[in-house]
């Protein structure tokens, strides 16, 4: 039996993969935020909540799972984003809300360089949405750095545990900012009353973790260059060291290995054991650490890909994700595995993912993607009655014929390195001699994931082949592959992108004279590097929040990024030292080679970017203007580093649509 929610808005309809060319949907179809972003089910399964987008405004609605009748809801401000949602009980939800805030330029010279900042907070709401409570530290710590640091559910009814750190120095303007005195805090979610928990750590304690009973059982300290993980056994009061690793272990400075490094994920059913991400070899795996012995037993590993992160449904860790060609869920318990297999069998030819579940897994929320749901859809399934209720398609106005067909390919770089990539082909074409958009990801130590992605799908809807290369230095393919990108900005990392273009030209897929490159963040750098280091390849260039001057960004990270030593050290390891390696870095800085630009350039940047300051686009625009090169510059007011908000996302797509139509028309 299938029931449908929001009937006037959505419906999951089986569609055929007809190879018929259709008119490209307007940018608004892809730029509008998904109607449904996430779904959560209450512990008993009687209710569910939906994070929705209503005309660009994030909101939460709650429903009765049996009748599908709406119970309540709230809407947040348009400059806020609901990043997370969890049910504390059948009566209450906890939201994670991030707001982009413009910094007053009169505060300090230092903070005004950022333009804006992201403020994160927790919010508690009742099931009917009528009682909204801000979760924050008590008065003495009100100005501390909260940043949504979750510790766990509280030991008392209607309480949660968070943590707050007091910053040394003088806040954001400090050149030698250090984090000290991190406190665990218990907050009543009905009243907002908060108090510091009577826990004794050290000045180096930076993280606390509670088990599902609300007992604080783990903490991490910075001590003389090491990170030390302490634990308390169930029922004990004394802390014991269970693991020690170098503070710089994640930078892999000399050994080229992360062996001996762990990341706690959460408590197991046996509360004296925790799941950890660890590195038994080149790739990360998930293991079970016994807090009594510090021994780790393997739970799951993949021969090619790193274990990505935990699946958090309900109170604990029930599995992990592995980003293969598509994010794959690996569950630990048999009940979850059985439900997962049943769901996949119910949607043959489509991909499914469990996104919410009751404690007994008798009612689950499922994300479905494929021919039955272009752009993805959400359903509620009763696994006992074998009954499905459609909540919504994420992009209800999107038709299958307007989407591209994604495949996962591998090509060989010039030095023999194997490079994985996502290739999205527009429907209704011959598949040969097509125009293309090359889309390197940001990070750069990140990766793309398979499945529907509004940006490459937007380009494919216009008739472009889209290549997303997972160049060396990308995350998820093992330590050595990630390290292969060290100090290879503009060099081998860029060669991997170039070799992807040549691969598609060589097999006849794309027309070598109709190739554009577009990227965001590091991808924006790669686009500008393409414009200046391999200008013969590209007919046009689009750079969003791109780095154009590596010397300037390295100096900025030292001067204006709060003086965080770890961040500065990381970028010097991966790019170089702005003084000792100045000539080498200038050789790969796009702004130093504007004279080589042949293609028109579109620059896009959020004015409140806290990761790559808008100055990076401004100085490149000034250099292009001085050199007489064609360019356009789209400034996004009230936008941060990402294209977070609906209005700016639509504006960005409109600017790119017009730019591509002018300089590299697909049809």
Image: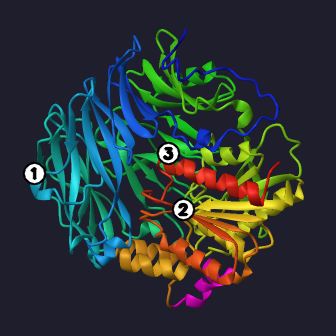
Up/down of 245 relative to 291, above or below = below
In the picture of the structure, the residue carrying the numbered disc 2 is 443
Q: Is residue 305 left or right of residue 611?
A: right
- Front-most of residues 285 and 454: 454
Instruction: Determine the secondary structure under disc 3.
Output: helix
Which residue is label 3 attached to? 646
Instruction: Determine if residue 460 is in view.
Output: yes
Vertically, is 376 above or below 470?
above
**How far from the left and from the top, in percent, is residue 551?**
52, 82
The label shown at residue 198 is 1
User: Which of the image's four quarters has the N terminus?
Assistant: top right
Judge whether residue 589 can be spotted in this image: no
Which residue appears at 32% of the width and 39% of the height?
95
Q: Mark 3 vs mark 1: give the one in front.
A: 3
Disc 3 to disc 1, C-alpha distance? 44 Å
Q: Residues within 10 Å of mark 1 (few under 14, many from 20)?
A: few
Which-is-in-front pick, marks 3 and 2? 3
């Amino acid at each position: 039996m299938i029931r449908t929610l929001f009937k006037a808005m959505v419906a999951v309809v089986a569609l055929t993969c007809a190879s018929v060319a259709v008119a490209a949907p307007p940018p608004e179809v892809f730029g509008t935020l998904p109607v449904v972003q996430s779904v959560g089910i209450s512990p008993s399964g009687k209710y569910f909540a939906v994070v929705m987008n209503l005309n660009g405004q994030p909101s939460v609605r709650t429903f009765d799972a049996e009748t599908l009748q709406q119970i309540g809801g709230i809407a947040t401000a348009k400059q806020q984003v609901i990043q997370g949602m969890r049910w504390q009980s059948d009566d209450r939800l906890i939201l994670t809300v991030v707001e982009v805030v413009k910094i007053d330029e009169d505060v300090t010279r230092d903070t005004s360089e950022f333009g804006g900042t992201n403020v994160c907070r927790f919010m508690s709401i009742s099931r009917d949405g009528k009682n909204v409570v801000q979760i924050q530290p008590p008065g003495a710590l009100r100005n501390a750095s909260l940043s949504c640091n979750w510790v766990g559910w509280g030991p008392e009814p209607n309480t949660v545990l968070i943590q707050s750190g007091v910053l040394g120095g003088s806040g954001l303007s400090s050149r030698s900012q250090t984090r000290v005195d991190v406190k665990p805090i218990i907050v009543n979610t009905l009243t907002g009353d908060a108090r510091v928990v009577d826990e004794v750590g050290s000045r180096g304690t930076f993280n606390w973790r509670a088990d599902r009973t609300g007992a604080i059982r783990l903490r991490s300290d910075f001590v003389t260059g090491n990170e030390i993980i302490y634990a308390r056994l169930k029922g004990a009061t004394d802390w014991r060291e269970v693991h020690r690793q170098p503070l710089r272990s994640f930078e892999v400075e000399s050994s080229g290995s992360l062996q001996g490094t762990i990341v706690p994920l959460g408590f197991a059913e046996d509360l004296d054991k925790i799941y950890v991400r660890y590195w038994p070899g080149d790739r990360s795996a998930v293991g079970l650490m016994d807090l009594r012995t510090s021994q780790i037993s393997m739970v799951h590993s993949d021969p090619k890909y790193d274990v990505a992160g935990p699946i958090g449904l309900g109170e604990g860790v029930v599995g992990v994700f592995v980003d293969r060609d598509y994010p794959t869920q690996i569950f630990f318990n048999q009940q979850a595995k059985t439900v997962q297999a049943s769901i996949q069998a119910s949607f043959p030819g489509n991909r499914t993912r469990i996104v919410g579940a009751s404690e007994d897994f008798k009612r689950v929320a499922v994300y479905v993607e494929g021919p039955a749901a272009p752009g993805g859809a959400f359903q509620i399934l009763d696994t006992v009655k074998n009954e499905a209720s459609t909540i919504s398609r994420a992009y209800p106005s999107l038709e299958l014929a307007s989407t591209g067909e994604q495949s996962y390919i591998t090509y060989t770089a010039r030095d023999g390195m194997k490079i994985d990539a996502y290739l999205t082909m527009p429907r209704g074409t011959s598949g040969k001699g097509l125009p293309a958009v090359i889309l390197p990801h940001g990070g750069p130590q990140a990766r793309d994931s398979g499945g529907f992605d509004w940006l490459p799908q937007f380009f494919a809807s216009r008739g472009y082949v889209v290549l997303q290369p997972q160049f060396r230095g990308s995350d998820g393919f093992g330590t050595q592959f990630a390290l292969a990108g060290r100090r290879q900005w503009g060099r081998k990392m860029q060669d991997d992108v170039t070799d992807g273009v040549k691969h598609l030209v060589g097999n006849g897929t794309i027309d070598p004279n109709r190739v554009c490159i577009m990227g965001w963040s590091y991808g924006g750098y790669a686009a500008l590097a393409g414009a200046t280091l391999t200008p013969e390849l590209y007919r046009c260039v689009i750079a969003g929040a791109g780095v154009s001057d590596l010397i300037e960004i390295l100096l900025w990270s030292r001067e204006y990024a709060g003086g965080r030593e770890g961040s500065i050290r990381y970028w010097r390891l991966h790019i170089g030292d702005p003084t000792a390696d100045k000539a080498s870095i200038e050789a790969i800085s796009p702004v130093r080679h504007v004279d080589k630009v042949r293609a028109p350039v579109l620059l896009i940047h959020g004015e409140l970017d806290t990761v790559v300051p808008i100055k990076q686009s401004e100085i490149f625009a000034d250099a292009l203007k001085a050199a007489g090169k064609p360019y356009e510059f789209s400034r996004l007011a009230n936008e941060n580093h990402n294209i977070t908000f609906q209005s700016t996302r639509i504006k960005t797509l409109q600017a790119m649509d017009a730019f591509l139509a002018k300089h590299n028309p697909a049809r």
